[in-house]
Image (cartoon, helix red, strand yellow):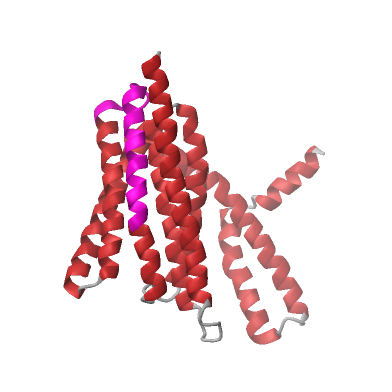
Amino acid sequence: MEKLKNILHKLLFPGTAVVVLSIPVGGGLLAYTFLVAGEESPVAYVSYVVSAYALAIVCAGLVPALKKANRWIRRNPLIKRFLEDVPFRLQITLHVSLGINLLYAVVNGGSGVYYRSIWFGTLSVYYIFLAVMRFLLARYSRQHGFGRDRKAELHRYRLCGAVLVPMNLALAGVVVLVIYQNEGFEYAGTLIYAMALYTFYITVMAVINLVRYRKYNSPVMSASRAVNLAAALVSMLSLETAMLTQFDDGTTAPYFRPLMVGITGGVVCALVVGMGAYMITHDTRELREMEAN
């Protein structure tokens, strides 16, 4: 058994020279197969085996390299703290998100004035609401931290829930403009695939973090995750409008796009309002219980 383990280890970790050489060899064999020899030639089977082995040893070689890189990165005290200190990381991300939202609000507001566009103006209002919530949370976290004064955090939590409700009006305006004025988000070329990957990632992470951060017993942390989820849901809506625009070849029914945007927009608006209502009612109930005791 030990001998077999040694053989497998040598196969997966043959050395840096073999790993580096396997990449052009495997790629070259595949290129020769598809461009010259053909998929049915004997060379094809050899190229499949060699390229599969090259992929396996490259992936195996990346594992220790990533571990070394991780150890090297963590030597920096600030980066180590960012990776390991959850409250500190959340403070940084809140401030970064606030800056991005303010930039989007200014750019869309300026575009709305310059082009006299209701579309850009509505987007600017939406980003202003996001910036307001993130400003409230970032300011509180910078001054008081997380989990120290539950009553004060509950007030911030309820305030964010209250802001989500009027923000939904701006979101509903975006949906209406997409449907009736044929406005929408557009991405140049293959950028839409990168945006799709990013949008699905932030949505999944927003849902995971919304559950994960509950264990810290900090309403401000939970509020920041709820805001992230609301922003991710709108990103999903914008991705849908962009995909409907880019991949519409003219064969779909004329009502298909407004129907899909209307359904998705309605669901997103309902979820945002539902989150805001839950944050307000849940927070008010707990504050009353605290005051009664």
Residue 14 percent location from the top left of the image: 64, 52
Please determine whether, in this image, residue 46 is positioned above or below residue 75. below
What secondary structure characterizes most of the magenta part?
helix
Instruction: Decide if residue 105 is in sight here.
Output: yes
Residue 112 percent location from the top left of the image: 22, 68
Please determine whether, in this image, residue 248 is positioned above or below residue 241. below
Q: Is 108 on the left-hand or right-hand side of 286?
A: left
User: Which quarter of the image is occupied by the C terminus?
Assistant: top left
Residue 246 percent location from the top left of the image: 46, 77
Q: Nearer the viewer, residue 277 or 62?
A: 277
Q: Residue furthest top?
A: 293
Q: Which residues are magenta?
A: 143-169
Q: Is residue 34 magenta?
A: no
Residue displayed at 26% across by 42% down: 135
Instruction: Decide if residue 185 is in sight here.
Output: no
Q: Nearer the viewer, residue 277 or 1?
A: 277
Q: Is 154 on the left-hand or right-hand side of 142?
A: right
Residue displayed at 29% across by 50% down: 129
